[in-house]
Image (cartoon, rainbow, N blue to C red):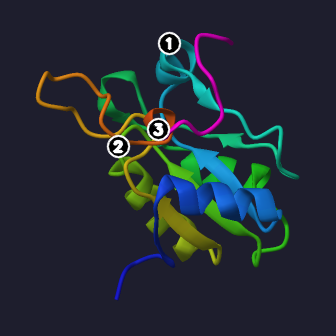
Amino acid sequence: MSLYAGDLTPDQAWDKLKSGSAVLVDVRTEEEWAHIGIPDTRQTDNDPLFIPWVFSGGIPNPDFVVELELQGPEDRETELLFMCRSGHRSAAAAAAATNLGFRAFNVLEGFEGVPGPDGQRNVNGWKNRGLPTNVGQE
């Protein structure tokens, strides 16, 4: 049994977002959002939340839980889909959200996915699967 509701592929997460039943929570750092891009959810009913799990240098965000409670939906039945770069930080964030009473999922592969044989993150993940992004925009 996992510490959260389950894992979703990026495509499954996109389907949930398009259905209007979920909110995406991007837990990467501000630098990642600015330099690598963000998911574009304009085709859905809900704007994403941007709450870093850690800050640059791996420093934990001591206010993550407070920020999630303030920004998250009042209805704890609304599913939260947590995304980071590759799916590891988001799993921890999904577990923390579950402890707050949210129905939380981890987005496998994250925004960029795992490094390929050449060391570049171009194998899988939200961006590499062709899902909507705002890459290179702030």
- Residue 13 location in percent, x, y? 59, 59
The structure residue drawn at horizontal position 11% and vertical position 29%, both measured from the top left corner, is: 117
Q: Three-letter amino acid code at disc 3?
A: Phe
Q: Secondary structure at mark 3?
A: loop
Residues rendered magenta in the picture: 129-138
Instruction: Kindly identify the amino acid type of the residue bearing the numbered disc 1.
Output: His
How many numbered markers are drawn? 3
Q: Earlier in the sequence, mark 3 or mark 2?
A: 2
The numbered dot on residue 86 is: 2
Magenta-colored stretch includes residue 133: yes
Which element type, helix, strand or loop, lies under badge 2? loop
Real-space Cα distance between discs 3 and 2? 6 Å
Q: CA distance from mark 1 to mark 2?
A: 16 Å
Q: Quadrant of the N terminus?
A: bottom left
| Disc 3 versus disc 1: nearer the observer | 3
Spot occupied by residue 27 in the image (x, y as percentages of width and height): 52, 42
Instruction: Tell me where residue 97 appears, x and y as whole percent.
Output: 56, 66
Question: Nearer the N terminus, badge 1 or badge 2?
Answer: 1
Q: Which residue is mark 1?
A: 35
- The residue where tag 3 is placed is 111
Is 67 placed left or right of 92 in the picture?
right
What residue occupies the far left of the structure in this picture? 117
Callouts 1 and 2 close, C-beta under 8 Å: no
